[in-house]
Image (cartoon, helix red, strand yellow):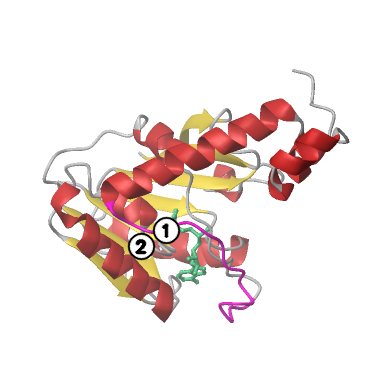
Amino acid sequence: MPTPDLNDRSLVRIVPRKLRDSLAERGLRSTIRRLWRAASSALRERRLGIRTSGSITASELEFDAASFGYQPVPYASFDAAMRHVSIRPDEDVFIDYGCGMGRAVCLAATYPFRRVIGVERSDSLSQIARDNIRRASSKLRCDDVTIATEDARKYEVPTDATHIFLFNPFDEPVLMTVLARIRDSLHASPRKLSIIYALPKCRRDPLVDVPWLTLQHKLETIDSDWQRLAVYESP
Ligand SMILES: C[S@@+](CC[C@H](N)C(=O)[O-])C[C@H]1O[C@@H](n2cnc3c(N)ncnc32)[C@H](O)[C@@H]1O
């Protein structure tokens, strides 16, 4: 698709600057894709009555370098991942490690999970997540949705947790500590467990080396420029 002539004077007057910059940087096709993504995301937020957009850096949250900042999971990515997990209604328990403003928590609660839990280190993000859950409550199928304000490294894994969601919340050392806690909870209470992990395309996926996890699905063509998604299961 040819990119419009960005030096055309009439275009300069009517096309907002941000849009012109995006056209110059990414071209027409990618700009249209981004606009479509932004519009459909706004529509989903509106339908659920929540506000989860935006991004906050780790230094703004006063985190150490091993904990990443806030960025919500793209709606299409969450939808795609959920097509690859099975849910036993009123039995399964979903945990989002690093739940931020609660987008994935609210979306998970539209499925028939018995419980949905968000774990978040930042007080202010936890509070926003709780507000979002309250606003979305009439649209949720799960009525036990809670947020634990805690560092994931210290969070005691409930022995009935069956679905773990990780949208690039922290670096490998923290991830490994969290996984060790999850493995301990599986030893204490053996059960089938799924882990949905989204990570930047440029990074190595450390979960491939975890002996007690088996890669079930790899989703490369989801609606985001930088991320890929993998679904793992414990045997
Ligand atoms: C990329 S955001 C993901 C947000 C959310 N899961 C979603 O999909 O919309 C990562 C989140 O992890 C949180 N986080 C980072 N390190 C953490 C830690 N050690 N313990 C708990 N939360 C953490 C950040 O505050 C941020 O909200």
Question: Callout 1, which amino acid?
Answer: Thr
Looking at the rendered image, the quarter that the N terminus falls into is top right
Residue drawn at the location 58% of the way across and 47% of the way down: 199
Q: Which residue is mark 1?
A: 52
Looking at the rendered image, the quarter that the C terminus falls into is top left
In the displayed structure, does residue 225 sit left or right of residue 49?
right
Residue drawn at the location 36% of the way across and 70% of the way down: 128
Using a 10 Å C-alpha cutoff, classify the residue at mark 1 as few (fewer than 14 neighbours), some (14 to 19) or many (20 or more).
Answer: many
Secondary structure found at label 1: loop
Residue 181 % position (x, y) = 40, 65
Q: Which residue is mark 2?
A: 184
Residue 152 % position (x, y) = 43, 70
* Distance in Å between CA atoms under marks 1 and 2: 32 Å
Q: Earlier in the sequence, mark 1 or mark 2?
A: 1
Residue drawn at the location 44% of the way across and 64% of the way down: 98
Is the residue indicated by label 1 positioned so its CB lies within 8 Å of ligand 1? Answer: yes
- Residue 157 visible in the displayed image: no
Residue drawn at the location 79% of the way across and 19% of the way down: 2
Task: Using the image as rendered, state which of residue 178 and residue 63 is in the foreground.
Answer: 63
Using a 10 Å C-alpha cutoff, classify the residue at mark 2 as few (fewer than 14 neighbours), some (14 to 19) or many (20 or more).
Answer: some
Q: Quadrant of residue 208?
A: top right
Residue 53 within the segment the image draws in magenta: yes
